[in-house]
Image: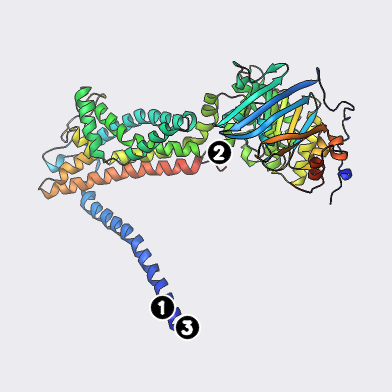
């Protein structure tokens, strides 16, 4: 039985102390009363959550509680699902990204995403990273962007001699770091990560987690994870989600990660992190 | 132990092995006999003169030049017209069309159109292209008719190739701020292209053997010139073969066999290209 006190916390960055419900200039993203439907099925109800700049926010919860759906409302990826419908506001740097006339294409340039299963394009390593800048009309030294992005993703040393090789020949962990480099190449402010390490072995997982900590200096990261140890290790804040009787997901508790894992206020949070269900 | 029963079961098992083997061999053996027979009849006539001569009343002077060039003209023009339309329709159906009953109806109809007898397309081509659009018995009218014939096949093959590109690739492109068209052009189409090319070539190799629709639009069997443009008259190999095979003199039967060999060589090389493309460029996800 894992005691909540036995989690190790990411100690490389100071946890911002005090106010568990931040407000003001340090907010980069804020969901206000968001609801999501797939057809007639309500997948998320009344989601309100504020995301702090340059922090890592983890979203945890059992399968089917709507974690991934919540992540995908932040860059409007959800609307690519034909029956999906979203209500409410998502404020990004003061503007509602769901307001009429907002272009989802522009939103996705500024809020990048890394998926659960590494999904490199079936092209060369170089082309994978260069794709984003290229389609966004980048006029400059593409080689520099590719190198810089790969360095940031801690992949450069492993691939610098085979940039023209197929990305599909890389290992799973390398592919995932390539996908992170690909996301970084368009210089987003926020990076959404949907269980980025769940398909990887432990050593590759460790690399991804170290990478997240170093990226948090320049980026805001929101990560969905199944793995509570991972949330405890890497994140500054944690939101715990559950599905209600109608299977609609909602947030039970959102606080500093340390608080969630040591003194959760809700019994259901405590039951989940101590492994009693989920 | 029930030994006689077990022996019976073993015998039945053996029997079915032989039945299935025989079923396989029927096709293979028939084809082999056919090929040998055609080669025996046709090879004496097969030489450069045969390839380089127009048809003639005199068997020694007759050749397939006009039919071969007509076939090539027809195929090239058909490919040029049907490829963009077929791929465009497949892209629309897979990447743009809403998933509703109208789209479902269109898809069902395309699948049914692929099974319509070719002579029906010939009648349509005769009414629409030859008469209504007054294109006459031209290569263009023939190519348009053939396009109608193979479009459903190209659309179905292209859709399958496009659908084989994993959704995660599209997600990856969209998440980087790609528009729908950028996603299709830069990621989906390049990954699907080998499959699309293979399907198109196989559809064209269906068209190359068709004679019924072209007889309907009255492609001629005696042409002593080469088409110089898309509005010229033409003939194709299957019609030339049909014409020679239906003559009473045995020499023309030899000519027909020789023309069949030419047709088979064209056909098999196209299929070889399709197989090569499929194996060389297929992406292993």
Q: Nearer the viewer, residue B118 or A128?
A: B118
Q: Is residue B99 left or right of residue A126?
A: left
Q: Which mark is residue B166?
A: 2
Q: Is residue A173 left or right of residue B190?
A: right
Q: Nearer the viewer, mark 3 or mark 1?
A: 3
Q: Which residue is mark 1?
A: B8
The reply to whether residue A238 is in sight is no
Q: Quadrant of residue A19?
A: top right
Q: Is disc 3 on the same chain as disc 2?
A: yes
Residue B276 image point, x, y percent: 45, 43
The answer for how far apart the CA atoms under marks 2 and 3 are is 54 Å
Q: Is residue B257 left or right of residue B24?
A: left
The answer for how far apart the CA atoms under marks 3 and 1 are is 10 Å
Residue B254 image point, x, y percent: 18, 48
| Label located before the other in sequence (1 or 2) | 1
Q: Residues within 10 Å of mark 2 (few under 14, many from 20)?
A: few
Residue B231 image point, x, y percent: 23, 23
CB atoms of marks 1 and 2 within 8 Å? no
- Chain letter behind tag 3: B
Label 3's element?
A: loop
Note whether B83 is above or below A198 in the view shown.
above
The reply to whether residue A253 is in sight is yes
Quadrant of the frame with the C terminus of chain B: top right
Label 2's element?
A: loop
Residue A106 image point, x, y percent: 63, 19
Note whether B154 is above or below A17 in the view shown.
below
| Label located before the other in sequence (2 or 3) | 3
């Amino acid at each position: 039985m894992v005691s909540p006190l036995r989690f190790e916390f990411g100690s490389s960055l100071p946890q911002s102390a005090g106010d568990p419900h931040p407000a003001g200039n340090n907010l980069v993203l804020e969901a206000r009363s968001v609801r999501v439907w797939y057809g007639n099925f309500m997948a998320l109800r009344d989601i309100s959550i504020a995301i702090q700049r340059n922090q890592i926010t983890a979203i945890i919860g059992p399968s089917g509680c709507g974690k991934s759906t919540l992540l995908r409302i932040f860059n409007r990826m959800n609307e690519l699902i034909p029956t999906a419908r979203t209500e409410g506001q998502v404020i990004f740097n003061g503007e509602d990204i769901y307001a009429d006339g907002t272009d989802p294409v522009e939103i996705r340039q500024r809020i990048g995403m890394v998926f659960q299963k590494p999904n490199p394009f079936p092209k060369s390593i170089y082309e994978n990273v260069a794709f984003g800048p290229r389609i966004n009309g980048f006029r400059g030294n593409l080689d520099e962007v590719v190198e810089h992005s790969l360095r940031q993703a801690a992949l450069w040393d492993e691939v610098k001699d085979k940039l023209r090789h197929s990305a599909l020949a890389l290992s799973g962990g390398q592919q995932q770091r390539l996908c992170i480099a690909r996301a970084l190449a368009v210089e987003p402010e926020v990076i959404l990560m949907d269980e980025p390490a769940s398909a990887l072995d432990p050593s590759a997982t460790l690399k991804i987690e170290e990478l997240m900590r170093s990226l948090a200096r320049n980026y805001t990261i929101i990560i969905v994870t199944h793995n509570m140890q991972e949330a405890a290790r890497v994140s500054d804040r944690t939101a715990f989600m559950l599905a209600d009787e109608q299977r609609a997901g909602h947030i039970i508790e959102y606080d500093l990660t340390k608080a969630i894992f040591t003194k959760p206020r809700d019994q259901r949070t405590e039951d989940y992190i101590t492994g009693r269900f989920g | 132990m029930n030994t006689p029963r077990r022996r019976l079961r073993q015998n039945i098992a053996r029997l079915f092995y032989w039945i299935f083997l025989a079923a396989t061999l029927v096709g293979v053996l028939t084809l082999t006999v056919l090929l040998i027979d055609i080669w025996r009849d046709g090879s004496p006539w097969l030489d450069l003169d045969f390839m380089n001569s127009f048809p003639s009343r005199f068997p020694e002077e007759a050749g397939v030049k006009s039919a071969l060039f007509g076939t090539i003209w027809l195929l090239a023009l058909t490919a040029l017209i049907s490829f963009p339309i077929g791929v465009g329709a497949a892209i629309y159906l897979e990447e743009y069309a809403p998933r509703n009953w109208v789209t479902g109806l269109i898809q069902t109809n395309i699948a049914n159109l692929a099974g319509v007898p070719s002579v029906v397309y010939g009648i349509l081509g005769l009414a629409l292209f030859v008469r209504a659009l007054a294109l006459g018995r031209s290569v263009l009218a023939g190519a348009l008719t053939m396009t109608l014939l193979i479009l459903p096949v190209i659309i179905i093959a292209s859709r399958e190739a496009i659908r084989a590109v994993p959704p995660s690739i599209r997600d990856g492109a969209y998440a980087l701020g790609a528009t729908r068209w950028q996603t299709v052009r830069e990621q989906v189409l390049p990954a699907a292209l080998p499959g699309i090319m293979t399907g198109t070539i196989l559809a064209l190799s269906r068209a190359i053997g068709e004679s019924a629709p072209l007889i309907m639009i009255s492609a001629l069997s005696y042409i002593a010139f080469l088409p110089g443009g898309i509005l010229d008259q033409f003939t194709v190999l299957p019609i030339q073969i049909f014409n020679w095979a239906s003559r009473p003199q045995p020499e023309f039967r030899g000519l027909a066999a020789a023309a069949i060999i030419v047709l088979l060589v064209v056909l098999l090389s196209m299929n070889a290209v399709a197989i090569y493309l499929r194996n060389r460029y297929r992406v292993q996800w």
